Image (spheres, rainbow, N blue to C red):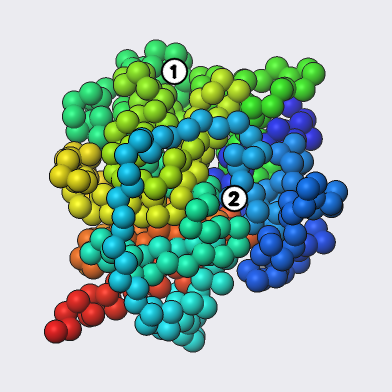
Amino acid sequence: MSSSISRTLSVALVATLPVLTTPFSASGQDAAPLSAEQSDPRTLGWMQGFPPPDDKIIRFSDSDYFNFPKSRWTVCHFRQLMPTTNVSRGLGAPVTLERRIDPAIDTLSFRPLGAEQDMTWLDALSANYTDGIVVLHKGAVVYERYAGCLDEAGQHGAMSVTKSLTGLLGEMLVADGTLDENAMVASVVPELAQSAFGDATIRQVLDMTTGLRYSEDYSDPNADVWIYSAAGNPLPKPEGYTGPRSYFDYLKTVVKEGEHGPAFGYKTINSDALGWIIARVSGKSVAQLLSERIWSRMGAEQDAYYTVDSTGTPFAGGGLNAGLRDMARIGQLLLDGGMAGGQSLIPQKAIDSIRAGGDKAAFEKAGYALLKGWSYRAMWWVSHNANGAFMARGVHGQAIYIDPAADMVIARFASHPVAGNAANDPTSLPAYEALARHLMEKSATP
């Protein structure tokens, strides 16, 4: 397949993988990116007017629809660009979050990794192109701020935070006995028997310790990621296209490389393979199961939604879009042992498995310089720090950060011009830890 066809067919997958992309200035030339304030989509006028001016229109069929700074509008409007499927919040009233706003948080100071000077919490939000952030402490909102394309009623792409919810659903099915973590993938999804996934265990898929030949090098026009993107694209395929036509079709073509088990390798296709496994054993898509087991029962404020391929399959690796407070509710649910409204939504066994973390030696082989001592379990990132913090992470700055010792949850949406989290981790991670210390000290003060 030619690089031009691959790139024209690329879908939101491009925004969900942990790779570095080149930021662009408003003129489209390689340059230092515009600041958060300069690239605010309202300031730049993207999609404003009826109709918008020709030079301010963003279409999914445009190859640059997710290039910075257009991406700062796109992250809040995937439903306007491509087909989606709903995640219903149900018909009951939302559960109101108590508010105890702490004005001292904005001036909280911390030292970014590798820096020589301190930074304030508020300055870090602009540095990380934060579109919205909510902090819960002991279940109450102590901080909330929105910028860019997002407000409290809006929805935003969760990117690879989606993977963690897919992993959570998988871990829940393991905990309740519906899914055997030691079973081979082929025994659950026979269609994958001849693929690289066939002789992997469910646990190896959950923890991404599969040996797969799959390149996510965006600088290579023939990389596997472009073929996968083309397969998942819901638009009609161009004349002469002979490749796979859905996520599931592509997964059947994945070839094995190395052995399953010894090393962690972050590859989005594991999440979509798990999505297929979940659908097969539960009889429901990840969107349906998420709604049934969690979203419709936790007191969510808004429906969520997933982007889908041409067969209506939700993108389990990065297609979730939701309101920010509802993402914080997910974190609080895990912090509360899976309990909401006096009911158990998530088995404690599933939460304990995630918090225990995965194989540190396997994770170390992946070479994450800023995540020394971390591990990966059920598609969650586990810090193993003194507070037992663990998190869901998505490119361009998406996060759910859960700190059990501080009784704190941070949910953040962002549109950083660089996809890789290495671009914002140096400020984000120490900021989260500084906020945890602040809240713990505040709680300890009589």
Q: CA distance from mark 1 to mark 2?
A: 32 Å
Left-right relation of 214 to 194: right
Please name the residue that numbered disc 1 is placed on.
Answer: 192
Depth-wise, is mark 1 or mark 2 nearer the camera?
2
For the point 36% across and 35% down, which residue is it? 90
Left-right relation of 330 to 240: left
Secondary structure type for disc 1: helix
Residue 210 horizontal/vertical position (percent):
40, 34
Q: The C terminus is located in which quarter?
A: bottom left
Question: Which mark is first along the chain, 2 or 1?
Answer: 2
Local packing at callout 1 (Cα closer than 10 Å; few below 14, some 14-19, many 20+) is: many
For the point 19% across and 33% down, which residue is it? 175
Whether residue 408 appears in this view of the structure is: no
What amino acid does circle 1 point to? Leu
Whether residue 50 appears in this view of the structure is: yes
Q: Which label belongs to residue 335?
A: none
Local packing at callout 2 (Cα closer than 10 Å; few below 14, some 14-19, many 20+) is: many
For the point 63% across and 34% down, which residue is it? 82
Which residue is most to the bottom? 117
Which residue is most to the right? 54
Please name the residue that numbered disc 2 is placed on.
Answer: 75
Left-right relation of 143 to 4: left
Secondary structure type for disc 2: loop
Residue 113 horizontal/vertical position (percent):
45, 74
Front in this rendered view, residue 55 or 206: 55
What amino acid does circle 2 point to? Val
